[in-house]
Image (cartoon, rainbow, N blue to C red):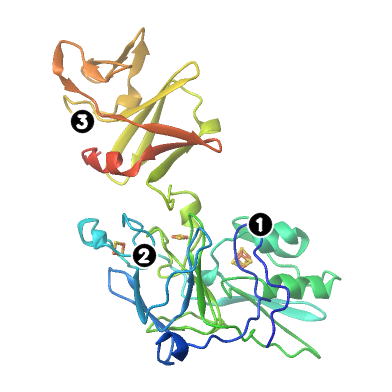
């Protein structure tokens, strides 16, 4: 089998039509056994016998019989699990009501099925063909549109297997590709090549050949990615996104991350980020106000210097000031520093 049309699309998802020769596993000391992925309860993914794992920087990991990949999003050694899921109390419970039933859309020439449970919101179908697939958050399929070839092309390139179709005169087959996992930058694990996902119910008309697994820990559809990584600050590096720059319009902006509170202070073009709870009574400083160089808590009027975070009247007490970085119109903080911010009940 030779490669035909191998490529990576604009979102970094590997296209389905990338057929490459099966690897010679035995020549590198890996026995040919079933390729499997096991989701450990509240823990990592155990990946067995998958020779090809491509990291988010495009580098191929050295082949190993077994790999332990993080799916809580907390490890310091991405993509590998470092045990952080235990301290993070990672809960892999599936919060979604979606049981994997497909919606069916019947057209004159083609019937399209959409299994929402599997969709990782890669944006491909509705950005490429909105008249058929709808828009973000509102996949609403109209299969009667004339360009059949294009519809089928989009469905075949759906990385998660959420989309499928039936049509007269067309044999529908999954591509026969070598087992591989592509780690999407700041995103999920894209799996191809019929790697068996042990003990997980995928729902109606799911592909056994490809699917997409959550890596950030935030999906409501675990173990599948549901696109939450785009909004929860997940990144491959140590930086953590807390806001889009365009959303920081007020002098004080509240940011909640789990039980941690931050406040973004904006003075003209200058931004600072502090721990967001008052040291006095855990009131939210984002609900306070700024006067001159002081941030005042609205509850009992404790005041903090907005350059240093120091409490007025007691230099031994200060808010935690976090390092920030602005990249591609996103405000980022250091993940380790975030973990030093005390958790509070609000
Ligand atoms: S249905 Fe498939 S192609 Fe469309 S957004 Fe979901 S994963 Fe992407
Ligand atoms: S699953 Fe172990 S560190 Fe994330
Ligand atoms: S990687 Fe977690 S929701 Fe996509």
Q: Nearer the viewer, mark 3 or mark 2?
A: 2
Q: Residues within 10 Å of mark 2 (few under 14, many from 20)?
A: many
- Residue at left offset 25%, top offset 59%: 84
Q: Which residue is mark 2?
A: 71
Q: Residue most toward the top?
A: 292
Q: Pick whichever of labels 3 and 1 is earlier in the sequence.
A: 1
> Which of the image's four quarters has the N terminus?
bottom right
Question: How many residues crowd around disc 3 within 10 Å: few (fewer than 14), some, or many (20 or more)?
Answer: some
* Cα separation between marks 3 and 1: 44 Å
Q: Which residue is mark 3?
A: 282
The quadrant in which residue 319 appears is: top left
Image location of residue 143, percent across then percent down: 76, 72
Q: Residue furthest front?
A: 27
Q: Position of residue 203 (x, y in %)?
A: 50, 80
Mark 3 and mark 2: Cα distance apart in space: 32 Å
Q: Residue at x 43, y 47 (%)?
A: 233
For the residues labelled 1 and 2, say whether their Cβ atoms are less than 8 Å apart. Answer: no
Identify the residue shown where x is 77% and y is 88%: 170
Q: Determine which residue is flagged by label 1.
A: 10
Choose between 74 and 33: the one closer to the eye: 33
């Amino acid at each position: 089998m030779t490669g035909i049309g191998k490529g990576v699309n604009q979102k970094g998802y590997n296209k389905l039509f990338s057929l490459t020769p099966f690897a010679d596993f035995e020549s590198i000391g890996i026995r040919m056994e079933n390729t499997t992925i096991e989701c450990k309860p509240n823990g990592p993914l155990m990946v067995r016998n998958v020779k090809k794992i491509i990291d988010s920087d495009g580098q191929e990991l050295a082949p190993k019989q077994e790999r332990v990949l993080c799916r809580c999003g907390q490890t310091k050694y991405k993509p590998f699990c470092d045990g952080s899921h235990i301290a993070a109390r990672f809960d892999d419970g599936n919060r979604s009501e979606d049981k994997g039933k497909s919606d069916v859309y019947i057209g004159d020439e083609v019937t399209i099925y959409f299994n929402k449970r599997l969709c990782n919101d890669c944006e491909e179908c509705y950005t490429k063909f909105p008249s058929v697939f709808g828009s973000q958050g509102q996949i609403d399929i109209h299969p009667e549109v004339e360009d059949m070839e294009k519809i089928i092309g989009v469905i075949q390139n759906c990385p998660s297997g959420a989309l499928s179709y039936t049509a007269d005169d067309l044999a529908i087959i999954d591509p026969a590709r070598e087992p591989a996992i592509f780690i999407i930058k700041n995103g999920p694990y894209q799996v191809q090549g019929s790697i068996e996902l042990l003990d997980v119910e995928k729902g109606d008309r799911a592909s056994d050949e490809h699917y997409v697994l959550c890596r950030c820990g935030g999906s409501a559809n675990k173990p599948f990615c549901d696109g939450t990584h785009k909004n929860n600050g997940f990144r491959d590096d140590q930086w953590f996104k807390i806001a889009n720059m365009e959303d920081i319009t007020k002098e004080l902006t509240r940011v909640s991350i789990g039980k941690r509170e931050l406040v973004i202070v904006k003075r003209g073009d200058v931004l600072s980020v502090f721990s967001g709870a008052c040291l006095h009574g855990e009131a939210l400083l984002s609900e306070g106000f700024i006067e001159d160089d002081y941030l005042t808590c609205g509850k009992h009027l404790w005041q903090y210097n907005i350059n240093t975070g120091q409490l007025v009247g007691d230099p031994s007490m200060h808010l935690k000031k976090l390092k920030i970085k602005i990249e591609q119109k996103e405000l980022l903080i250091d993940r380790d520093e975030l973990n030093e911010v005390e958790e509070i009940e609000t």
